[in-house]
Image (cartoon, rainbow, N blue to C red):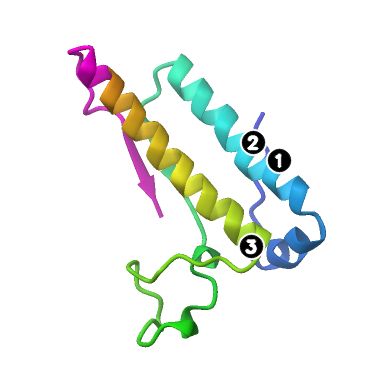
Amino acid sequence: MVKVLTRPFQSVGESSEKPLEYYRVNVGGTITLLRCMAKHNVPNIVFSSSATVYGDATRVPNMIPIPEHCPIGPTNPYGRTKSTIELIITDFIEAQRNNLKKDGKPYEQWNGALL
């Protein structure tokens, strides 16, 4: 079972007190999930990230409300775990597609959506 922390506002402060726990659960849990997906040929994932990946969006002019093209810049462990997970999922999907393509197999079914 993968435990997912789902209380972003409480999680932000708590993540600064227990950063290793947040990395273990959020990043480690995601890696376990992606391995299971590969093993059982589950090709699609939708990841509900967090606005915390952008950090303090006021540091960049014209970024409120936060658009998707706002530069990533998390300022706490919770946001950094979410940002790291986005990168891991992107790398995983790209590798799955590239490996299947290299083997001459259909690869388009592997997809990831980062919200």
Disc 3 residue crowd, few under 14, some 14–19, many 20+, Cα 10 Å? some
Which residue, given by chain and number where applicable, does mark 2 sit on?
A: 28
Residue at the bottom extreme, as displayed: 61
- In the picture, the disc for residue 8 is 3
Picture coordinates of residue 3, whole percent (x, y)? 68, 39
Asked whether the beta carbons under mark 2 and mark 1 sit within 8 Å of each other, the answer is yes
Which residue, given by chain and number where applicable, does mark 1 sit on?
A: 24
- Alpha-carbon span between mark 1 and mark 3: 16 Å
Nearer the camera: disc 1 or disc 3:
1
- Vertical relation: 44 (above or below) 40: below
Tell me which segment is drawn in magenta. 100-115
- Vertical relation: 2 (above or below) 60: above
Is residue 110 inside the magenta stretch?
yes
Picture coordinates of residue 103, whole percent (x, y)? 23, 12
Q: Quadrant of residue 97?
A: top left
Residue type pointed to by label 3: Pro
